[in-house]
Image (spheres, grey):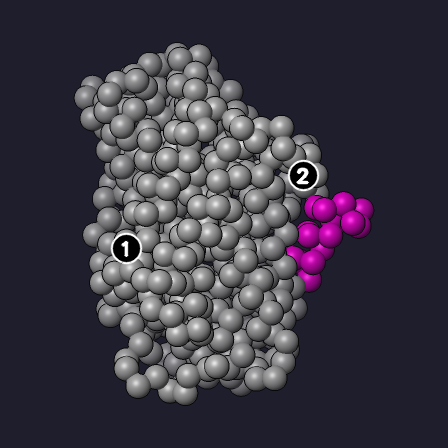
Amino acid sequence: MIASEPARKRDGFTTSLGVMAATLGSAVGLGNIWKFPYLTGMNGGAAFIIIYLLCTLLVGLPVMITELIIGRTARADAVTSLQKLAPGTPWWLIGAAGVLSAFLILGFYTEVAGWVFAYIFKAARGMLSSTQPLVTSKVFGNMVSNPVECLVWQWIVLAFISVIIIAGVSKGIERMTKRLMPLLFALLLIVCVRSLTLPGAARGLTFLFKPDFSKVTGTTILTAMGLSFFKLSVGMGTMTTYGSYFREEQNIPATATKVMLADVLVSILAGLAIFPAVYAFGFEPDAGPKLLFITIPAVFTSMPFGQVFMVLFFILAAIAATGAMLSLLEVPVAFLNERLGWSRSISTILTAISLALVGSTAALSNSTLAEFKIMGKTMFDLFDFLSSNVLLPLGGLFLCLFIGWQFGFKNTVASATNHGALHNEAIVTLFFWIVRLVTPISVLIVLLNGLGIIA
Ligand code: TRP
């Protein structure tokens, strides 16, 4: 049942700064600090970054604006928003698929966040103070192959984000992200300076900025596009849900563009923090998901007061992950709360319990369930692959089709110009044609080619 206009005021972000902090808090996360560096390392460096930036401009950013428009116009959760804007049509299925994606993404994301939380304590106890690749690799290996340790940290993470979500949108999400985002920037800058001044740092810079397109394949392009979805939290309803909390006078295209630029900056900074150190200490850039967990300790160990900074760095990585997880968890919680009328606490607790079940299969992927594979992938890899490389692109594709062909030009202009108040018709018109044609066609080609369906 859809409640008619809510009698009580809907919770939402209260200031323009709060909108920025929460939205950026959603975008910035393990995607920048963990995924971006390791994918760049595995896919050959600069060429991958260039393709990723192109995908961000042509796909990630347009889908982000699309979702924010849908959410703010409908002012409802990801499923109900589509129903409100197109009653009696099947478009709401995109929202329903998004709620499912939230489970897959959180299933592995809470595990990686668990490793980050655990690392705060390992760093504090001095277990990570080494510049030897073998030593830090071993600490990481011991942790992920210990089933109890993995499960417990994942549950701690789930409990932590649940408490903030229960506190609400303005009092939980907004307040938390506004305080912590600036700290994250500052610390990242310090680590970059240290990494860049290490002897041998130049090779890392070459790797990051000198493109070699010879290794680029259809799969590389799909990976880069998947990352552009994952990075900007788009394709599954997070930005629709957050858009529904946006203020009426917020400039959506400008806010989205600022968030995108800041997010790219954080990724590049993370790359600058990691790759010079990779080369300086003799690590391999293609170490995969464990890259962050073995190189960052080495960078810190080699600087004065390194241990203190190492602890701080992992605290901040945990904060970045938290802002992102809040936005993921908010999608099913808003749906259950507004749609089924369950209280925020009950919706959150039930979601967290289901997540603990789904997520445990990812948490045990390096230990108890290491041999359990579907399509040749462990559950951890499968959740990651299915979400970024299949569900988010499909969700984004359909959301663009929704705006471009169902919602239409007039509604889009009305919403994205704040009914003419912003005088940005030219940009909005350009945006409209991009999401009507360019983005859907690009996504479709990259998706079919990357999955090997067309050559
Ligand atoms: N953008 C976040 C990161 O880079 C992850 C994230 C948050 C996300 N919400 C999302 C990814 C919604 C996909 C969809 O860490």
Residue at mark 2: C-beta within 8 A of ligand 1: no
- Quadrant hosting residue 385: top right
- Residue 402 vs residue 107, the one in the foreground: 107
Q: Which mark is residue 164?
A: 1
Q: Main secondary structure of the magenta part?
A: helix
In this rendered view, identify the residue nearer to me: 59 or 159. 159
Query: In screen coordinates, is 451 left or right of 383?
Result: right
Query: In the image, what residue occupies the spot 65% across and 68% down?
Result: 437
Of the residues under marks 2 and 1, which one precedes in the sequence?
A: 1
| Residue on which the image places disc 2 | 374
Q: Nearer the viewer, residue 353 or 185?
A: 353
Q: Do the residues bearing badges 2 and 1 touch, measured as CB atoms within 8 Å?
A: no
- The disc labelled 2 sits on which kind of residue? Ile
- Asked if residue 347 can be seen in this view, the reply is yes
Identity of the residue drawn at 51% across and 61% down: 99
Q: Is residue 132 left or right of residue 164?
A: right
Determine the residue positioned at 66% across, 58% down.
Answer: 442
Among the 4 quarters of the image, the one containing residue 438: bottom right
Instruction: Measuring from the top left, give residue 122's x and y in whole percent.
Output: 30, 24
Q: Residues within 10 Å of mark 2 (few under 14, many from 20)?
A: few
- Label 2 SS: loop
Q: Which residues are magenta?
A: 441-455
Residue 112, image x, y percentages: 43, 37
Residue 33: give its label. none
The CA distance from mark 2 to mark 1 is: 34 Å
Q: Is residue 5 magenta?
A: no
Task: Tell me: is circle 1 under 8 Å from ligand 1.
Answer: no
